[in-house]
Image (cartoon, grey):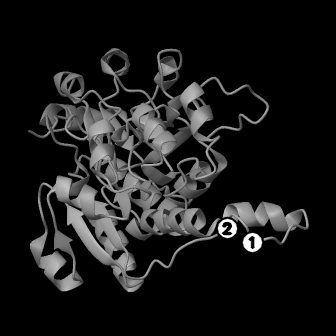
């Protein structure tokens, strides 16, 4: 079912065109780069208000006087907040991201709030960042950088392995997963994949073999997660999954933090079943990422424990952070909002469906 927008109603479309010269959009959780790229893509009939706070119970009132809101991955849009937005007359939410697990879709539907996302921006950005994590963990470049700046040119503790001919498992073969697999093939890896909806034509052309999840976990030397976070994939990588992996496996997550059970990952690291862990996302990142917290005491004990391991590398959800990706995100977001403002139908690929 496609969520209703209120603009599907001709009377509401007419009312909008009669009463609005501009569609006023409140953009929550903005940084300087959001302003830069959205402003570059902006056009009539849109007027943006850039707000630094994230959307939440204490900030939802900032949407008053606007016709739409624009959100990012860690903005909160649960049932209570969606009800508040509807009371303020908000019937359009534009997500400047792909995932929408932070939205209560049933409440959005009940309140005729349309949700638009960015279904694809630069799959290369995220896939390439996954490989940045792989290479850094394998060749310890982050540790070597710190050593050489202190005049230490010793090689002990920096031993890596050749990636060629390694078995790389890809969980999720959407656009990002497919690009990741093709990069891995370019490095001479054997690539196996798992997806509830296999793309067999692509796999045949790319030289990728589909496997059941259990087989992929058992065979892979490197595993990279590129699937969405749903009820079915929440804590997909848990104690049972780690038990099926080979000793010393490398696990990379540039998808969503909730795909990995963090407590189970810590146990797997301590037992040395998990040999390397690269994370660009974290299941409790909402109150941490995208902010400078260097002068604060880290209150998240599990993240603090993870970062004590020398074979763990954490980045702050920067996989999407390239010029090309930010441009594409801004352009798609603006295009959806312009279509709504003009009473037209946005690209159907951007509509969030239940």
In the picture, the disc for residue 72 is: none
Residue 40 point in image, percent of width and height: 56, 60
Q: Is residue 303 visible?
A: yes
Q: Residue at x 27, y 56 (%)?
A: 217
Residue 46 point in image, percent of width and height: 45, 47
Which secondary structure lies at badge 1? loop
Question: Could you tell whether 334 is left or right of 298 in the image?
Answer: left
Relative vertical location of residue 209 with respect to residue 227 in this rendering, above or below:
below
Image-quadrant location for residue 1: top left
Question: Could you tell whether 311 is left or right of 77 in the image?
Answer: right
Q: Mark 2 points at which residue?
A: 158
Residue 86 point in image, percent of width and height: 31, 20
Crowding around mark 2 (Cα neighbors within 10 Å: few <14, some 14 to 19, many 20+) is: few
In the picture, the disc for residue 155 is: 1
Q: Distance between the residues labelled 2 and 1?
A: 6 Å
Q: Which of 79 and 192 is in front in this view?
A: 192
Of the 4 image quadrants, the one containing the C terminus is: top left
Residue 93 point in image, percent of width and height: 35, 37
Whether pointer 2 and pointer 1 mark residues with C-beta atoms closer than 8 Å, the reply is: yes
Relative vertical location of residue 84 with respect to residue 237 in this rendering, above or below:
above
Q: Residue at x 51, y 60 (%)?
A: 326
Relative vertical location of residue 198 with respect to residue 204 in this rendering, above or below:
above
Crowding around mark 1 (Cα neighbors within 10 Å: few <14, some 14 to 19, many 20+) is: few
Q: Which of 200 and 77 is in front in this view?
A: 200
Q: Residue at x 37, y 75 (%)?
A: 166
Relative vertical location of residue 168 with respect to residue 78 in this rendering, above or below:
below
Q: Which residue is drawn at 42% across and 55% down?
A: 251
Count all numbered tags in the image, as a single digit: 2
Q: Is residue 24 visible?
A: no
Which secondary structure lies at badge 2? loop
């Amino acid at each position: 079912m496609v969520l209703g927008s209120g603009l599907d109603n001709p009377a509401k479309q007419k009312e909008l065109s009669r009463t609005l010269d501009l569609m006023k959009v409140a953009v929550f959780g903005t940084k300087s780069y959001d302003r830069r790229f959205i402003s570059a893509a902006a056009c009539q009939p849109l007027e943006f208000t850039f707000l630094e706070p994230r959307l939440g119970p204490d900030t939802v009132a900032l949407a008053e006087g606007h016709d739409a809101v624009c959100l990012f991955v860690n903005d909160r849009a649960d049932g209570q907040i969606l009800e508040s937005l509807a009371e303020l007359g908000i019937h359009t939410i534009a997500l400047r991201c792909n995932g929408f697990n932070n939205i209560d879709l049933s409440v959005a539907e009940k309140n005729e709030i349309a949700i638009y996302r960015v279904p694809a921006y630069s799959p290369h950005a995220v896939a390439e960042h996954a490989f940045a994590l792989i290479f850094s963990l394998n060749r310890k470049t982050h540790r070597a950088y710190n050593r050489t700046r202190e005049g230490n040119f010793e090689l002990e503790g920096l031993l890596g392995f050749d990636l060629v001919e390694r078995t790389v498992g890809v969980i999720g073969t959407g656009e990002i997963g497919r690009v990741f697999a093709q990069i891995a093939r370019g490095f001479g890896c054997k690539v196996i994949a798992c997806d509830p909806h296999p793309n067999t034509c692509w796999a045949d052309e790319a030289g990728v073999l589909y496997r059941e999840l259990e087989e992929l976990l058992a065979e892979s030397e490197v595993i990279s997660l590129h699937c969405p976070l749903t009820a079915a994939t929440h804590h997909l990588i848990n104690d049972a999954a780690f038990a099926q992996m080979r000793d010393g496996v490398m696990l990379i997550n540039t998808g969503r933090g909730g795909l990995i059970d963090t407590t189970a990952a810590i146990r797997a690291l301590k037992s040395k079943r998990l040999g390397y862990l690269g994370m660009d996302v974290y299941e409790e990142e909402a109150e941490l990422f995208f902010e400078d917290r260097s002068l604060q005491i880290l209150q998240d004990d599990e993240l603090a424990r993870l970062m004590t391991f020398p074979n763990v590398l954490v980045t702050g959800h920067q996989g999407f952070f390239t010029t090309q990706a930010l441009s594409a995100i801004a352009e798609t977001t603006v295009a959806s909002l312009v279509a709504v403002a003009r009473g037209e139908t946005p690209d159907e690929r951007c509509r969030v469906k239940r």
